[in-house]
Amino acid sequence: QVQLVESGGGSVQAGGSLTLSCAASGYSLYMYYCMGWFRQAPGKEREEVAIIDSGGGSTRYADSVKGRFTISKDNTKKTLFLQMNSLTPEDTAMYYCARGRIAICNGVSMIRGEADFSYWGQGTQLTVTV
């Protein structure tokens, strides 16, 4: 059974930093899948934050987080990370990690949107205060 468990959320002051983690289990060939971070703020639709391909060499970021967030993965530990810097109150949301559908994902261009992700974690809350 595929499981994705996010951790690292919490409350942080504006301008601060935080790193989210997502531990994957229940399936093999972790290194071959694209992974992603999404977020959903109250009253808003879920949005893509960052995507990374199987090898980690191809990434994509939402314009709102470019230059501030960094997505990475440790294939040996089956863990996905999201390093977040210069946080603002607009980053407040529930953050979800997700695993792509495609078993061999060599490039984020293979990911068009949420429909290309088949498994989701329960989320971890980030609150950024002024």
Image (cartoon, rainbow, N blue to C red):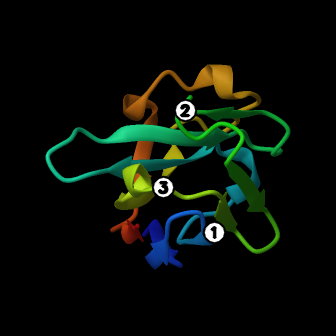
Helix, strand or loop for disc 3: loop
Q: Earlier in the sequence, mark 3 or mark 2?
A: 2
Q: Earlier in the sequence, mark 3 or mark 1?
A: 1
| Mark-to-mark CA distance, 3 and 1 | 10 Å
Tell me if residue 23 comes above or below residue 31 in the rendering. below
Q: Position of residue 110 (x, y in %)?
A: 62, 22
Q: Residue at x 81, y 45 (%)?
A: 56
Q: Residue at x 36, y 66 (%)?
A: 123
Q: Earlier in the sequence, mark 1 or mark 2?
A: 1
Marks 3, 2: nearer the viewer: 3
- Where, quadrant-wise, is the N terminus in this rendering? bottom left
Quadrant hosting residue 48: top left
Q: Is residue 71 left or right of residue 118?
A: right
Tell me if residue 15 comes above or below residue 54 in the rendering. below
Tell me if residue 39 comes above or below residue 46 in the rendering. below
Q: Which residue is mark 3?
A: 88
Q: Which residue is mark 1?
A: 17
Q: Residue at x 69, y 58 (%)?
A: 30
| Mark-to-mark CA distance, 1 and 2 | 18 Å
Tell me if residue 126 comes above or below residue 34 in the rendering. below
